[in-house]
Amino acid sequence: MLEKIKSGDIMEMKENINIEFKREFTTELKKEVVAFANTNEGTIYIGIDDFGNVIGIENADEILNQVVLSIRNSIKPDITMYCNSKIEKIENKDVIVIKVQRGTLRPYYIADKGLKPSGVYVRQGSSSVPASEENIRQMIKETDGDSYERLRSLNQNLTFDYAEKIFKGNNLSFGLSQKQTLGLIGEDNLYTNLALLLSEQCNHTLKVAVFEGIEKNIFKDRKEFKGSLLKQVTEAFEFINLLNKTEASFEGLIRKDERDYPVEAIREALLNAVIHREYSFSGSTLINIYEDRIEFVSLGGIISGLSLDSIMLGVSQSRNEKLANIFYRLHLIEAYGTGIRKIFTNYERYNMKPTIKAEVGAFQVVLPNIHYKKIEEKLLVDNSFNKNIEKNTTEIKPLYTDILNFVTDKNGATRKEIEEYINFSQTRVITLLKEMLELNLIRKEKDKIDRRSYKYYKK
């Protein structure tokens, strides 16, 4: 706390990391206050120029009031409890002295600029400079902890049109108090990252890629889903389900339709990928669809302390507890720790099972296509049929040539003459002649002498 300051003391001081001189009060003052609050404590003198000359200010009481109002209304979170402003006499002139302590809710920022470099300042030497985005994230993490969903969102201009529609559809309110209770708004009345995830401004996306065959070589289709996570989940599920083909079988007279993938298994794998991923990573949630499987890949891996075995036993430790709670309230999930087991339960009556892979930084659930072996068998039958056709065609081609040579030499021949020449049955020759007509190798005309019979000529 500063009391009376001697003229000599001021002359010996220079602007540095903890001291800032201002000739007069301007709106730039809030930038200096923010910088000191975000870095280390500092003192601002209004009425002293950059060279340390005491200029003084007129109407000091009025200016002091403007200073207090500016700090209170222009800076978020509230920094007033860490600021002390008063009028001091230096060289018999009025100088306003503002003592700013390092705040506990960093990063502080200029309200109309937001949590971005243009609104967040730090002290470097004798200057106040914009903080980098990485510096801003680090301050948020130091203040709010490691939980991504609890951290303050860098974007405070959020809209919730889709979320409001979903809450309304479930007869749930989605007003200010509900946002605070659910964790979308923190104690500082700022939006959290949880709010960002549910907003139209969500910067995380979900990508679905459809491949031809069972390798990642040829794309058949791809789609990226954006916006609120609630919207992404809904639209991605609809898209995947459109590709989930139905195969019909019969038990007696009863027709039985069955999808390539159990619908509930798709649903649970999709929700698991979205709810439990690590959102501090910037990559997209990935879904790859092949002819024999669907892969759901989410970022983050298994939470420390858990294993694949414990997950299979139903042990639940959500990385995003508040996000999971919202999905639970919206009846999108039934209970924590049941999703993976439900996926496997849906495959119990089949001779193939889902697989789970966990790597550092990634988690993958793979659903097998329950009809893929039948598809392979059908392809084998089709290939066998085609090979037989090719084989038969190869055998028949020399006969075509023999017949063509014969009808050419004779300048036309009847069916009976062709039968006698190649020594084949009537039925076989009729078939051969029909094939050659369809292939446009020969033409058929009435015999000019015997109008009741036909002759075949090379075309």
Image (cartoon, grey):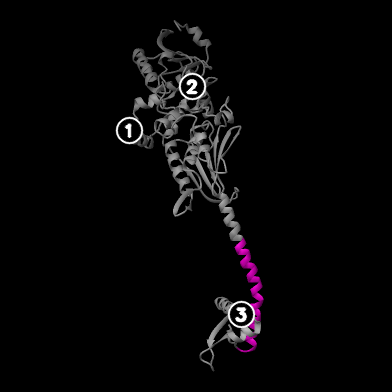
x, y (%) of residue 126? 53, 19
Callout 3: helix, strand or loop?
A: loop
Q: Is residue 211 above or below residue 120?
A: below
Q: Which mark is residue 171?
A: 1
Range shown magenta = 384-411
Q: Residue at x 47, y 7 (%)?
A: 7
Give the vertical position of 441 relative to 247 (above or below): below
- Judging depth in this view, the residue of 427 and 384 nearest the camera is 427
Q: Residues within 10 Å of mark 3 (few under 14, many from 20)?
A: few
Query: Which residue of the protein is positioned furthest toward the front in this rendering?
Result: 252
Q: Residue furthest bottom?
A: 449
Q: Is residue 175 visible in the rendered structure shown here?
A: yes
Q: Toward the viewer: 341 or 225?
A: 341
Residue at the image point whose x is 66% and y is 81% from the top: 402
Of mark 2 and mark 1, the one earlier in the sequence is 2
At mark 1, the secondary structure is loop
Q: Amino acid at mark 2?
A: Asp
Residue matched to label 2: 144
- Residue 425: mark in rendering: 3
